[in-house]
């Protein structure tokens, strides 16, 4: 009997491929670029499952084209690329990879915070450009991290871990979330506040909210105007949470000290985007979870979700458990 077909939409760590190959016919899209829509639809026409990435839209058109699909396993925490309602209506299990990347992403968010505060990227570029002539008392002065106020927008798993890292720098931590988390407040000694207060009081604002219709451009011109001129904005959540035109205007005018972005709108960022012209804006290519260990764990978890559906078991990180009741 033929093995069920599983399409993997990008090269992933081999451990996940080997795990799937024990029970499935695995096809991997070998390019580092996402498969074009037509190719994605062609490759999944008869697929049992897809190991998908954020760049793959699992929507009604996709599901219409893949009538045999039973599982879409997203190799990411976010799943705004998946139409959960459509998946559930059609009996397709959707899953993601939470928790396994929490610490790694929190590490990177704090790395971006420190790099922007202390102008690390500017300093490295300064040396490479041959500009370093001597020690200078006014050269590349930055902002202190220790004893500063950190404002978190979103206090999920990653936000809470960033708060823990801030303790090592004796930072005061305040946060805003649509759901208040008194247990975390008590455990970490952090304070809940409304969004305006977080923006006004924080020396560093780190964004950890999911992308929803309510959070699209959550930080735009009026919100950025409330931040301190010496403040740093860090975004490791989703690019469209921050309005890029408003961010450029604030940074260019000196109304904001710096920004550090792991995610952008659009993504990847076009080379003619004006944010790339600013020395006080660090932009990296969506690599917050990019450690060898974590990316391997993410891929293996996605594979385990696919195999669980194949074997009639509950997937470890299912997003639409109601589909199992139908």
Image (tube, rainbow, N blue to C red):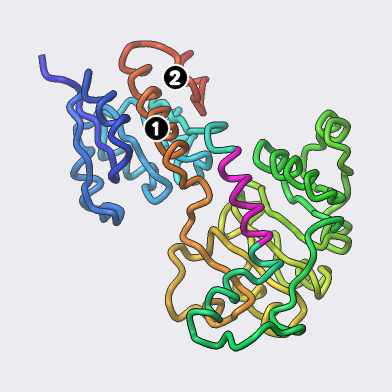
Q: Quick one: SS at disc 2?
A: loop
- In the picture as drawn, the residue positioned furthest to the top comes out as 312
Q: Quadrant where the C terminus lies?
A: top left
Whichever of labels 1 and 2 marks the residue nearer the N terminus, that label is 1
What residue is shown at x 49% (from left), y 33% (from top)?
97
Q: Which residue is mark 2?
A: 315
What residue is shown at x 73% (from left), y 44% (from top)?
165
Residue 187 percent location from the top left of the image: 84, 30
Q: Residues within 10 Å of mark 1 (few under 14, many from 20)?
A: many
Q: Nearer the viewer, residue 188 or 271?
A: 188
Q: Quick one: SS at disc 1?
A: strand
Q: Is residue 286 magenta?
A: no
Q: Quadrant where the N terminus lies?
A: top left
Q: Are marks 1 and 2 in contact (CB under 8 Å)?
A: yes
Viewed as shown, does residue 22 lie left or right of 116?
Answer: left
Above or below, comparing residue 214 to residue 284 in the picture: above
What residue is shown at x 39% (from left), y 32% (from top)?
73
The disc at residue 73 is 1
Q: Nearer the viewer, residue 50 or 284?
A: 284
Residue 267 percent location from the top left of the image: 46, 62
Residue 219 percent location from the top left of the image: 70, 63
Viewed as shown, does residue 75 lie left or right of 265?
Answer: left
What residue is shown at x 71% (from left), y 67% (from top)?
117
Above or below, comparing residue 151 to residue 66 in the picture: below
Q: Which quadrant of the figure has residue 191?
A: top right
Query: What distance separates the C-alpha of mark 1 from that of mark 2?
Result: 10 Å
- In the picture as drawn, the residue positioned furthest to the front comes out as 134
* First to last magenta residue range: 103-114
- Prevailing SS of the magenta stretch: helix
């Amino acid at each position: 009997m033929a093995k069920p077909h599983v399409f993997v939409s990008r090269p992933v760590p081999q451990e996940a491929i080997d795990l799937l190959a024990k029970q499935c016919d695995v096809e991997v899209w070998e390019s580092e670029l996402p498969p074009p829509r037509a190719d994605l639809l062609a490759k999944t026409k008869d697929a049992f499952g897809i190991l998908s990435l954020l760049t793959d839209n699992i929507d009604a058109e996709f599901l219409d084209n893949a009538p045999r699909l039973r599982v879409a396993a997203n190799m990411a925490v976010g799943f705004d690329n998946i139409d959960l309602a459509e998946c559930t209506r059609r009996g397709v299990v959707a899953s993601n990879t939470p928790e396994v990347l929490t610490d790694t992403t929190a590490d990177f968010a704090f790395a971006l915070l420190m790099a922007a505060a202390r102008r690390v990227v500017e300093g490295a570029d300064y040396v490479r450009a041959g500009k370093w002539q001597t020690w200078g008392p006014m050269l590349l002065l930055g902002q202190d991290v220790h004893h500063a106020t950190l404002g978190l927008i979103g206090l999920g798993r990653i936000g809470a871990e960033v708060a823990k890292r801030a303790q090592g720098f004796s930072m005061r931590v305040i946060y805003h979330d649509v759901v208040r988390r008194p247990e975390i407040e008590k455990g970490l000694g952090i304070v809940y506040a409304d969004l305006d207060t977080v923006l006004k009081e924080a020396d560093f604002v780190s964004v950890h909210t999911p992308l929803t219709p309510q959070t699209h451009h959550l930080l735009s011109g009026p919100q950025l105007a409330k931040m301190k001129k010496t403040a740093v904005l860090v975004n490791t959540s989703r690019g469209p949470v921050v309005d890029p035109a408003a961010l450029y205007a604030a940074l260019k005018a000196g109304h904001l000290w710096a920004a550090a972005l792991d995610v952008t709108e659009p993504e990847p960022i076009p080379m003619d985007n004006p944010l790339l012209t600013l020395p006080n804006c660090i932009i990296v290519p969506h690599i917050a979870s990019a450690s060898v260990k974590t990316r391997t764990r993410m891929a293996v978890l996605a594979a385990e979700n696919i195999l669980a559906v194949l074997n009639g078991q509950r997937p470890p990180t299912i997003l639409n458990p109601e589909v199992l009741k139908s």
